[in-house]
Image (cartoon, rainbow, N blue to C red):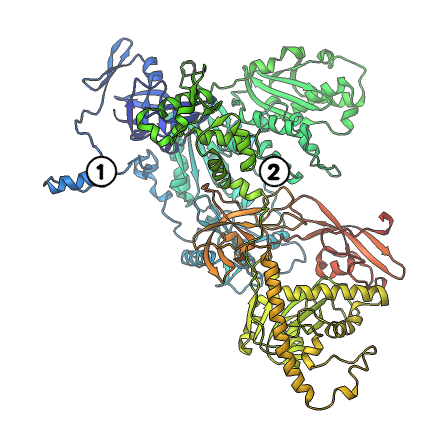
Amino acid sequence: MGKFLLDNIYVTVLFDSGADTSYMSVKMCQLLKRAPTLLPTKHVVELANGKSLEATHVVQGCNLILAGQAFTIDLIPIVLGSFDVVVGMDWLSQHQAEILCSEKVIRIPRSGQEPLEVQGDKSGAVVGIISFLKAQKCLRKGHTAILALVTDALAKERKLEDIPVVRDYPQVFPEDLPGLPPHRQVEFQIELAPGAAPIARAPYRLAPSELEELSKQLQELLEKGFIRPSSSPWGAPVLFVKKKDGTFRMCIDYRELNKVTVKNRYPLPRIDDLFDQLQGSCYYSKIDLRSGYHQLRVRDEDVSKTAFRTRYGHYEFLVMPFGLTNAPAVFMDLMNRVCKPYLDKFVIVFIDDILIYSKSQQEHEHHLRLILELLRKEQLYAKLSKCDFWLREVHFLGHVVNKDGIHVDPSKVDSIRNWPAPRTPTEIRQFLGLAGYYRRFIKDFSRIAQPLTLLTQKGVTYRWGNTQETAFQYLKDRLCSAPILSLPEGTDDFVVYCDASIQGLGCVLMQRDKVIAYASRQLKVHERNYTTHDLELGAVVFALKIWRHYLYGTRCTIYTDHRSLEHILKQKDLNMRQRRWVELLNDYECAIKYHPGKANVVADALSRKDTLPKRVRALQLTIQSSLPAQIRAAQIEALKPENVKAEALRGSRQQMEQKADGAYYVTGRIWVPLYGGLRELVMDEAHKSRYSVHPGSDKMYHDISTTYWWPSMKAHIATYVGKCLTCARVKVEYQKPAGLLQQPKIPQWKWEEISMDFVTGLPRSQRGNDTIWVVVDRLTKSAHFLPIKETDKFSTLTDVYLKEVVSRHGVPTSIISDRDARFTSELWQAMHKSFGSRLDMSTAYHPQTDGQSERTIQTLEDMLRACVIDFGNGWEKHLPLVEFSYNNSYHTSIQAAPFEALYGSKCRSPLCWAEVGDSQITGPEIVVDATEKIAQIRQRMAAARDRQKAYADKRRKPLEFEVGDRVLLKVSPWKGVVRFDKRGKLNPRYVGPFEIIEKIGKVAYKLNLPAELGAVHNVFHVSNLKKCLSDENLIIPFKELTIDERLQFVEEPVEITDRDVKVLKHKRIPLVRVRWNSKRGPEYTWEREDRMTEKYPHIFGNQATTTEAEATTSEFRDEIPDQRGEDVTPQENQ
């Protein structure tokens, strides 16, 4: 054991002849910044303590310095204890090393020289760990104690002064940008499209944590001079994006400004062109500029256009901010001008990333000095923690590059390997976008991906079948085992293999038996009619065009499996297409040769890098044995005297019998002991595998109990299933809903306590109203139905409320309502605070809180439907008589009509004139009678409430939680409702878990929701909650959410694609077909033109709209439904 250098980092190394292979700790692997490669097979490594660890990757080519001499070693990352590296027999036997235990020396023979002796740590002091009780005893006996802090001291990151060459340029690596950048040869300009006017948007609402971060970052930017207070007519809102390290990046939403900005078409370099420059290199340094965009000034006359609005003021940028459309192009222009003398010689630049590459160490030192000197001269600053120097392998633009060639980035491979099957065309595009970035690694990429690509085309019905699943999985496998592509060396010896089929064109570029790149594409519609001869020739032309930068001006050989193409340049009778292609062939110095398709030269020539050297693959690690063998081994250990008590076998011990396979059985079933954790393994396989998809506890018990047995097996399985987070999230509960009925107190007097709600979405009446405001007295059940507009301002609602409610009945003491935005507004709450009225709002997703208003609305809608059917005309004309009829009709809970409870008697009507005529309403007796009736009504309501509670509680169960409990929150995957970014029948029924932070009343709880759901009311009724018993630390992600306070996905119309008119008997209703920006892909609905014009005028642009005179809006909504997701079909399609 000793400390030695591994890739220039000091590590603790153990030389272990008992280890088959060499290992390194996972933490050490992260410090080395080397990309691990995948092992050909998964191994289970058995440690000295008997535990097993699974190893899947190996880090190759690490440099280990022993006694001043460098050695190469391959290390498998696993979790180690006190050591950073364990050198095993694979390395020791390769170098014929001897371990002299008595001298603590490793002796390595060298040809023609004396053996190399590596001196280990000879310190005889061994640090031992003692218990706290033993330490107390030692102190009582008078032993000397020294207080020390013991830590795992892994090597720290190298400091600036430790890096050769770089330490001579500290000015390039400041801790922060020193202030405003100097005026450079390029300044950021914002050219506007003709006629563009200033645009200002209201600031977004931010969570408290984001507001705190906003204040902090604004202060930092002001101190640096990057921003200043502004009075510009422009203004963009601010939002925050979480970075990988958990901190927040402030972003300005410049989308509106970007729409009216003239685009800068400065070209960004092609990724494959950049990599071509790296041929022959083996030393690399990567420099990342510190806040690169902030090192470029904005042109003075354009500063006002960068203005942004926040809660803390209006500011504008003096330096180039993030989020502007032309920022990458302008910064690329600057970096190309700065690095122009060295571009494509030993430097490549992609926006703010600089890569220096060299063929030798001395050359790299010279190149690094030139670039650092250039950055110092130009006053461009880099961030040391994001820079890497003197690398033999570098991660750049999603690839890994070393002297052997180009690799796929392992982190991207992991993303592809874990990618779930796409469910929409959009998700297919996302997958193909990532996979397509590496298409040069995959032979026949287009042919493999064709079943997926077809589903992304317009007019194709989305059907995910076996063909698509096979293509998806095969493409993932090919990407995860992608070969290493070599970088071209010089311009000689290029060979191209071409092939064509009815599915597409494919070709491979090689040089000296090494694969340089793959290319493929699908056939276009007209190309499917080509002859075989033309298709094969088209594949040759495709290869020459796509690799022109390699093949033009050089000698190359093209192989095809179509023999007639060997003589294509000599043929005289050619069609027009062939003539055009032959003319292109004449520009190249290429020889077309035939090779049979069966030869499969390309497959033989693939230069796939071995995942492990042969010497490692020849060794054999401990492979995990089969389940029966594990059970037999565990049974032997469990029956030992020190373990048998924990098995709790009791009388079952006498029933055990050992059969021919060596295992113990109880009543014909194999006994699974507690020892070794095999019960969890059996239950995992029976519950979570592909062959047993989360059965319930009863089904799972019956499945397992036919083969396996252990004490209290049924109870253990029930506990296991109860803790399964997947089951908790997706399975419906068949128990009674939680939460006993809680009823508000009976009011003391008329119109003291009221409830209210809105009926929205009605057809617009002749007065322009489309909403009914329903206000109900909780004691007398009398109600007012007030017609309003859904878009009415708060001042209009206040006037209606004072005129129709307060002036007639006085100011109420309490108001029950749902959490409509109008009721939760600060103005509404402030008004009622001044009145002395208490606002009682329902919990989220529990409309039963205001059950009275909900029931009244049902009755109101039924009455309006009846009036429209019987009497015609608009709904608003019937509303006064509907209100009269409702208030003058018998109500079950008060056993009287609301008018009778309110005024002492029913109101006159043609039918009931005798009962309420003039002779019946004279004298003061009616006042006394009305007062007595209030007492009777309160008694009747109390009796009715008792009946309702007894009836409701029979179908409910009491359920209580404690503060600190973790619960799952019910969402609705039905009826097209979108909540928490989840939609559809196959999405989870519950999300979470979330922590309870407060109990509200008897049946409501406040939850600690994530910041993404900051706009959602965090108090929920107990019926929407379920206790989370799982120990899994799993949180459902809420990414890219666009939700309102009702947890509904905010969808916007994109364009009008068609128009029609619905012709009824006496009416013509203009309709438009709208395309929406749905997250599920393209979505189209027919909507009423007048409502779309009012709500979304911007999508009509200069299009002419149908006049209001052509449409009659007096129809009730059941005749022309216009809600999203309902069918509004043009006449010819009915």
Image position of 318 with respect to 789: above or below: above
Image position of 568 with respect to 25: above or below: above
- Horizontally, residue 179 falls left or right of residue 770, namely left
Residue 254, x across and y down, in percent: 57, 53
Local crowd size for mark 2, using a 10 Å CA cut-off: few (<14), some (14–19), many (≥20):
few
Tell me the amino acid under the disc marked 2.
Gln
Q: Residue at x 71, y 77 (%)?
A: 899
Of the image marks 1 and 2, the number of the one nearer the N terminus:
1
Q: Residue at x 79, y 14 (%)?
A: 572
Residue 888, x across and y down, in percent: 74, 75
Secondary structure of the residue carrying tag 1 is loop
How far apart marks 1 and 2 lie (CA) works out to 55 Å
Q: Which residue is mark 2?
A: 430
Name the residue nearer the viewer: 167 or 130: 130
Q: Which residue is mark 1?
A: 131
Tell me the amino acid under the disc marked 1.
Ser
- Quadrant that contains the N terminus: top left
